[in-house]
Amino acid sequence: MAQRNDSGVATVLAIGVFIAVVATWVFIPPAVIRSAWMTERGEVYAIAGEGEHVVYGQAVRGLKDSMVKDFKGFLAEAESIGQGPLGNASLSQWMRSRIEATWLWIGLLVYRLHVLIGWLVPGIPLALVAYLDGHYIREIRKFSFVAQSPIRHKLGIRVMWVALVGLSCWLLMPIPLPALIAPVLTVSLSYSLWLWVSNLQKRL
């Protein structure tokens, strides 16, 4: 019954996130996304220094190599809608703004992914250490009279889900967000992994 409830909640959340993303895409001005990108660039630069230019360059270069031709075609089609005696200038302007917003939003997403990859360099060894420490703690407890805690085990799963949801929101939200969210979530995932593994039942 609990699994069905969890599945239902996950489905409702997924639908809600999809609706929120679509509604945001319809109404958000491109300037808001551009401002979010520039703000986060400043925060990352304050932490990484000149390394931020490398991250930004990789993100922009990847976009230009893979998508710039497609977006130029989309813009040309949007402009053609507003031309001629039957053209709709308002619709053309709205479509062009949506194309620009999409380009900037994808760019912000790619930029954040590059920032996340940078934090995974120390984050992956941290997760491995957390897993191994939790594993050996569980092995030691197998030969002692210490009971495993199903509450802590479940808490580890909950923390992991919260961290994953937070990571998804950080990647998708087109508003300025603190640059330290990525390392905080990376540490949270490592802690949840340790909590989950160290409190696995002894019989498993």
Image (spheres, helix red, strand yellow):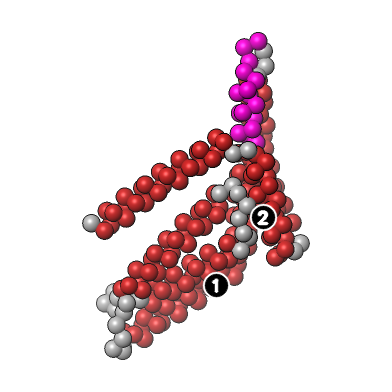
Asked if residue 43 is positioned above or below residue 106 in the image, the reply reads: below
Amino acid type of the residue that numbered disc 1 sits on in the rendered structure: Pro
Kindly state the secondary structure of the residue where label 2 is placed.
helix
Q: Residue at x 55, y 72 (%)?
A: 125
Asked if residue 134 is positioned above or below residue 182 in the image, the reply reads: below
Measuring from the top left, give residue 202's x and y in whole percent: 29, 79
Q: Do we see residue 42 in this rendering?
A: yes
Amino acid type of the residue that numbered disc 2 sits on in the rendered structure: Glu
Question: In the figure, is residue 87 to the left or right of 129?
Answer: right
Q: What segment is highlighted magenta in the picture?
A: 85-100
Q: Residue at x 32, y 52 (%)?
A: 7
Disc 2 marks which residue? Answer: 40
Disc 1 marks which residue? Answer: 125
Question: In the figure, is residue 116 to the left or right of 83?
Answer: left
Measuring from the top left, give residue 82's x and y in whole percent: 65, 19
Q: Do we see residue 51 in this rendering?
A: no
The label nearer to you, 2 versus 1, is 2
